[in-house]
């Protein structure tokens, strides 16, 4: 079995700056309760969706208009056997220009098919990035996906 991190890519007509700014406005596209900040290096924020999902992220790399990396320092995925399956994984946003469009490549490094949550979590990330974050970038408003 191949260890493959979950990855999805979107392509938009907006600038790298607009994509970068949208990523860092986490509360506008990641549905649930967000506490803390995600705009500069070493910022930390918490995400909570009812009693189902809790995670704490730390911004460990930020290159304006190019890359954002979060380290997940704590998690509680209540519906899985290993509730801390995300601990130590990284969420990576890479921005580049492809054929005069801005490409956003999202990767959850460490979210691999061997994880119990892979199916549910990759599906949720797919909807959040491909629909909600895409909508925030292209229309200025995130889209409720669940």
Image: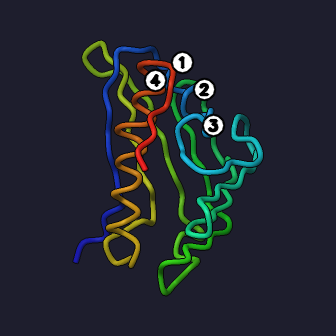
- Earlier residue among tags 2 and 1: 1
- Nearest-to-viewer mark from 1 and 4: 4
User: Do the residues bearing badges 2 and 1 touch, measured as CB atoms within 8 Å?
Assistant: yes
- Determine the residue located farthest toward the bottom in the rendered image: 81
Q: Residue at horizontal 60%, vertical 26%? A: 64
Residue 144: % across, % down: 45, 40
- Earlier residue among tags 1 and 3: 1
Mark number displayed over residue 137? 4
| Crowding near the residue tagged with mark 4, few <14, some 14–19, many ≥20 C-alpha atoms within 10 Å | many
| Crowding near the residue tagged with mark 3, few <14, some 14–19, many ≥20 C-alpha atoms within 10 Å | many
Q: Secondary structure at mark 3?
A: strand
39 to the left or right of 15: right
- Earlier residue among tags 1 and 4: 1
Q: Residue at horizontal 51%, vertical 19%? A: 140
Judging depth in this view, the residue of 28 and 84 nearest the camera is 28
Q: Secondary structure at mark 2?
A: loop
Residue at mark 3: 62
Residue at mark 2: 64
Q: How many angstroms separate mark 1 from mark 3 (CA)?
A: 13 Å
Decide: is 13 above or below 128.
Answer: above
Q: Secondary structure at mark 1?
A: helix
Residue 19: % across, % down: 49, 24
- Earlier residue among tags 2 and 4: 2
| Crowding near the residue tagged with mark 2, few <14, some 14–19, many ≥20 C-alpha atoms within 10 Å | few
Residue at mark 1: 17
User: For the image shown, how many numbered marks are present on the structure?
Assistant: 4
């Amino acid at each position: 079995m191949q260890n493959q991190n979950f990855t999805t890519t979107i392509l938009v007509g907006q600038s790298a700056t607009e994509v970068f700014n949208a990523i860092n406005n986490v509360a506008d596209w990641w549905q649930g309760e967000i506490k803390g900040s995600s705009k500069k290096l070493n910022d930390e924020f918490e995400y909570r969706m009812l009693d189902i999902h809790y995670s704490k992220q730390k911004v460990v790399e930020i290159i304006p208009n190019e890359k954002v990396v979060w380290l997940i320092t704590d998690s509680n995925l209540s519906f899985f056997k290993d509730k801390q399956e995300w601990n130590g994984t990284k969420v990576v946003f890479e921005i580049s220009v492809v054929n005069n469009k801005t490409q956003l490549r999202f990767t959850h490094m460490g979210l691999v098919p061997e994880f119990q949550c892979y199916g549910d979590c990759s599906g949720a990330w797919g909807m959040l990035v491909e629909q909600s974050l895409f909508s925030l970038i292209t229309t200025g408003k995130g889209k409720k996906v669940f």
